[in-house]
């Protein structure tokens, strides 16, 4: 729909723009026509003829224009838009006549006069008819030339200046020199564009804003169909050669280029899906040559060599806070998924985002890898409850989860610390205390259902029973000579059993209670007293 091939080149289109100050009235990003090398002599009568043989099921018949020299009278492509009304009288604006004279009068690009100037247009506007165009004047817009017959016909068919929603008075002259031999013209409430590939089509101002923001015809091509409204929330769309522009009263007007982002947006339901309408134009030049676009309910990002991925709004805000694709998370590598509790989760190049009761939290690097190996949020640690924190002893990092923590250091790697050990480790000063960083993950299935974990400076063991007779919890730290003596006795499987409290000082050095005895260390000696 809306595309076609054209016949003979139309050398005269936009000639007025070359005679006047070329491009002075154009919107930024639009090209003006180059001045023709010479103005050929006009030799035949202009006609507008349908070409049904060129039509197909997808391509309706269209007008072809043949130009000529003799005044065409009523057969001109620039036929009057009204029955001849009030004509210009002395004192009625002479701007139309002045503009015509400035363009060279009958010997200029507009050719001879066809009809008297008609001042029956709304708002006391006037229009002058010439063999090769018209001059339209209003007090607000001045005298503007329409000299492309297809733009003129499209303007008239759209209501010209007579009906609500019509393009209104022209605000620029016709400008040409666009891609594909294209021409355009801006009006008060719309623009009209035509090229060798498409019909002259009206682009309403609400769509025009998004088309311009996307790069005009250089990015989306020319319009191929009229605007379509009645979308979600009263929105509208218009198709272009290389994309679509969508408008809603909530988001304004934004273009989507044909490609992975538009396709992915369509897959999730267009404007009716969770993303809703676009809220930005597509932007490229991102990390690695990627592109992205924001929508009311999230974003779509496309890294080269991969598919386009949706990042819902709940994730977009947190991802933005980490630096988007330039930050440690990089690009998304998965679509959003529901966690065990139904909340949002999504994986990225360098980490993951998880929504929790504490907010949307990032988990990245070796800590993310270790958490994943433990079963993600469905594993022993559960969901994250803090952001990752670094700058710890020896350049380490840590992160707390619902049922424990993961700590990483260059010397020890990433290790899980379950809640049953966290409180005891914290009581000993975390990684800055005598225990240092964990050197193993917790190991369970020990005697009586107990668990243990080794650290740089010792170990923590839990006997599997709640409480603790010293009232300090059920997991206890063991280190130094006492740890060596306990190990020599067979750890928890030996006669001593599990520790029943932390080590404490006495007159001989330090001592520690176990289920079946006490170990005392001091003066270079270690002694066991059985209960």
Image (cartoon, rainbow, N blue to C red):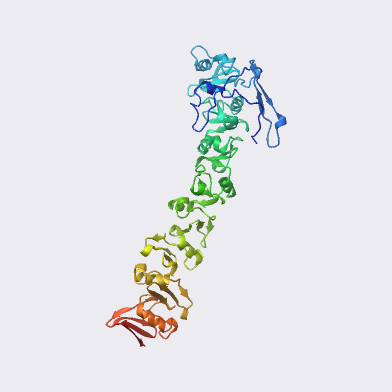
> Which residue occupies 49% across, 77% down?
445
- Give coordinates of residue 409: x percent, y percent: 41, 65
Instruction: Say above or below: 516 vs 228.
Output: below
Q: Is residue 45 visible?
A: yes
Instruction: Say above or below: 168 vs 239.
Output: above
- Give coordinates of residue 151: x percent, y percent: 59, 27
Instruction: Say above or below: 171 vs 277.
Output: above
**Residue placed most toward the observer, 163 or 53:** 53
- Give coordinates of residue 329: x percent, y percent: 47, 55
Q: Give the left or right position of residue 48, taking residue 521 as reference.
A: right
Instruction: Say above or below: 19 vs 428.
Output: above
Q: Give the left or right position of residue 174, taking residue 45 as reference.
A: left
- Give coordinates of residue 45: x percent, y percent: 66, 18
**Residue placed most toward the observer, 91 or 347:** 347
The quadrant the C terminus occupies is: bottom left
The quadrant the N terminus occupies is: top right
Q: Give the left or right position of residue 83, taking residue 325 as reference.
A: right
Q: Farthest residue toward the left?
A: 507
- Which image quadrant for residue 68? top right
- Which image quadrant for residue 217? top right
């Amino acid at each position: 729909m809306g595309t076609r091939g054209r016949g003979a080149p139309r050398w005269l289109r936009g000639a007025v723009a070359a005679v006047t100050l070329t491009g002075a009235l154009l919107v930024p990003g639009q090209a003006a026509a180059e001045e023709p090398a010479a103005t050929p002599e006009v030799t035949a009568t202009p006609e507008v003829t349908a070409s049904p043989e060129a039509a197909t099921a997808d391509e309706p018949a269209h007008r072809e224009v043949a130009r000529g020299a003799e005044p065409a009278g009523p057969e001109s492509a620039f036929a009057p838009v009204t029955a001849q009304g009030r004509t210009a009288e002395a004192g009625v604006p002479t701007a139309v006549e002045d503009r015509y004279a400035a363009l060279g009068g009958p010997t200029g690009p507009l050719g001879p006069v066809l009809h008297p100037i008609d001042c029956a247009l709304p708002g006391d506007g006037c229009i002058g008819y010439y063999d090769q165009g018209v001059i339209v004047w209003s007090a607000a817009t001045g005298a503007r030339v329409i000299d492309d017959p297809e733009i003129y016909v499209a303007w008239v068919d759209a209501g010209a200046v007579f009906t609500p929603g019509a393009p209104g008075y022209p605000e620029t002259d016709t400008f040409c020199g666009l891609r594909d031999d294209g021409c355009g013209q801006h009006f008060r409430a719309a623009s009209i564009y035509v090229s060798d590939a498409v019909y002259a089509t009206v682009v309403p101002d609400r769509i025009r804003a998004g088309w311009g923001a996307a790069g005009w015809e250089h990015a989306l091509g020319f319009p191929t169909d009229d605007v379509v409204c009645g979308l979600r929330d009263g929105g509208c769309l218009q198709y272009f050669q290389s994309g679509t522009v969508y408008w809603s009263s909530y988001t304004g007007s934004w273009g989507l280029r044909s490609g992975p982002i538009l396709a992915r947006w369509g897959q999730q339901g267009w404007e009716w899906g969770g993303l809703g309408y676009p809220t930005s134009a597509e932007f490229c030049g991102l990390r690695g040559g990627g592109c992205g676009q924001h929508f009311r309910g999230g974003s779509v990002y496309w890294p080269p060599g991969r598919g386009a991925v949706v990042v819902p709004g709940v994730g977009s805000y947190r991802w933005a806070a980490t630096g988007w694709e330039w930050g440690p998370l990089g690009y998304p590598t998965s679509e959003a998924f529901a966690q065990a509790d139904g909340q949002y989760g999504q994986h990225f190049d360098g980490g993951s985002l998880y929504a929790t009761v504490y907010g949307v939290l990032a988990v990245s690097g070796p800590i993310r890898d270790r958490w994943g190996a433990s079963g993600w949020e469905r594993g022993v640690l559960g969901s994250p409850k803090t952001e990752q924190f670094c700058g710890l002893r020896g350049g380490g990092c840590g992160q707390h989860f619902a049922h424990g923590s993961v700590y990483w250091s260059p010397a020890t790697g990433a290790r899980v610390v379950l809640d049953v050990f966290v409180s005891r480790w914290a009581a000993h000063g975390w990684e800055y205390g005598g225990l240092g960083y964990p050197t193993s993950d917790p190991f369970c299935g020990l005697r009586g259902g107990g668990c243990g974990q080794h650290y740089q400076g010792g170990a923590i063991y839990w006997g599997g029973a709640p409480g603790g007779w010293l009232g300090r919890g059920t997991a206890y730290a063991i280190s130094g000579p006492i740890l060596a003596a306990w190990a020599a006795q067979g750890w928890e499987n030996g006669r001593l059993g599990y520790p029943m409290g932390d080590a404490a000082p006495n007159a001989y050095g330090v001592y520690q209670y176990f289920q079946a005895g006490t170990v005392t260390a001091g003066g270079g000696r270690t002694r066991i007293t059985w209960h």
